[in-house]
Amino acid sequence: MSKSTTPTTEEVFKLDVITMNKRTQVLPAYTKYHQGPPPGTPATGDTATQGAAPTEIETGYQHAPWGATDRMPTTLRLKLAKVSIAGRTINQLVQMMYGNGLVYVRNSDYAADRAALKPAYIPEVEDWLIRNRIHTHWLPAQFVDFRHTLATFSEIIFSQDFSLITGLYHKPAEHCRLSKQNEKTNYSDWLLYSPDYSYKVTTSSDRITRIPLYCWQDPESFFSQLRGRKMAWYSHMYTAGMNYYPDPFWMGLFRDDGWIDSAIQVPEVVNALMRNQATLKYQILIPESYFKIRNPQWETYSAQARADLIDAKVRELNAALSGTDNAFLSISTVFREGLNGDAQGKIEIIALDDKLKNDNWVPSSEAADGQIVQGLGLHPSQVGLAPEGGKMGAGSGSDKMQTYNIGITLNTIEQNIILELLNWVARWNAATNPNWDIRFFINHDTLTTTNQQESGVKPSEFSTQIQSPNP
């Protein structure tokens, strides 16, 4: 007789109980005997499948808050501003992303022969770039925000007939928030813009400008509902688990009592030590017998007369021991010997241990600096720091050259994220103006050794070379 496989009542109704955030929750009894479909809504439609709108932002905000206090971009910037090496690192990373600046090529040339590409020059495009300050304002600002938060925002303005995009403007990330996701589409419909976001916990609706946010997942529906000639664009790096905003990969630096806090505290400790430490170079011992030998009537002098003689001698010794003019000079004193050979009236000058000169008393931020630079994404040698455990100081010239070349190679993905908008603008304008059938790039030179290139710089294929008229 075979054993029955019918489940027992205990097996069918066995429940899983979990505790999250101090709340106990009983999970449905889906066992191997359950024959129905799992819970949820079937995925349908032709667009990307989205999950339900996040519920963790239902905290009283009228928008999707950025971080626990809705001030993450500002918090990051203010903390980085307190660490000198962090500002230097951000600046250098931005410069490495910018390279030699923005260039563009015709798509026909790009498709024909990528190995022989030359930058194009189209007056209409050049005029548009200058008018919108793309080289000097929009692009650097996008890189700066991206290096702080991995997110950037822009505003686009269309012509009256929507045939061309006439304006492109950077919107500071600190002043931008996304609207809560639309419960029907699970997309944010608006970019909310207000300077108040950078310094206020709450702000009134009359202080917020609402800009339609481009929906790349469903552009046809977006443009069919667009009213007005403006829209916003959101560029960002995707990070694991994000709903609205990315979590920068360097957030570990900002943990409580982390490396950023450590680096902030070092100058505060040093300043406190300097305020509370007396820095002495010499200790001068002048016995009272010195004055008695030289002034036989010493015992009859008034207290003020004695003080005047002592002060005069101290001033004389200080003048002899200080100043660069007295460097390496010697001081001689005459003293009397007693019957037992003991010195009487002898001045002694004792040199004190100069801890300030030797940096023995100064707390070092070197370890924190190295962690911050690497955490932000730059090799320490690029800012003159020695890698931990390194034996060549800040590295050889070849080391710096290689880490620089690696850096500008690895930031290609970030450049593509930012340039995606510019290339989208070019495609839009090209629909009515063939001169806009172009593709944007960042022009980079790579460093090489002087035996391969006399200048030590290997120009990129987009670099403009000015040839001498005389061979």
Image (cartoon, rainbow, N blue to C red):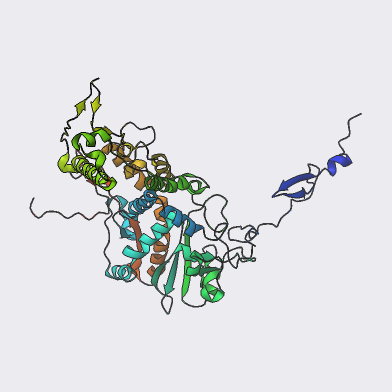
Q: Is residue 112 left or right of residue 207?
A: left
Q: Residue at x 92, y 28 (%)?
A: 1
Task: Check the image and report above or below for 192 versus 413.
Answer: below
Q: Between 69 and 422, which is closer to the camera in this rendering?
A: 69
Task: Check the image and report above or below for 52 versus 204.
Answer: above
Q: Residue at x 52, y 47 (%)?
A: 255
| Residue 278 visible from this viewpoint | yes
Instruction: Please give the count of numbered marks on the rendered protein.
Output: 0
Task: Check the image and report above or below for 462 versus 325.
Answer: below
The residue furthest front is 300
Question: Quadrant of residue 51 in the image?
Answer: bottom right
The residue furthest top is 340
Q: Between 294 and 279, which is closer to the camera in this rendering?
A: 294
Q: Is residue 456 left or right of residue 144?
A: left
Residue 192, position as x, y percentages in the image: 52, 69
Q: Residue at x 38, y 52 (%)?
A: 87
Residue 6, position as x, y percentages in the image: 87, 38
Question: Quadrant of residue 397 in the image?
Answer: top left
Q: Between 370 and 273, which is closer to the camera in this rendering?
A: 273
The residue furthest right is 1
Q: Between 429 and 137, which is closer to the camera in this rendering?
A: 137
The residue furthest bottom is 160
| Residue 286 visible from this viewpoint | no
Residue 44, position as x, y percentages in the image: 65, 59
Q: Residue at x 41, y 39 (%)?
A: 367
Q: Is residue 108 left or right of residue 145?
A: left
Task: Check the image and report above or below for 133 versus 99.
Answer: below
Residue 256, position as x, y percentages in the image: 53, 47
Question: Quadrant of residue 400 in the image?
Answer: top left
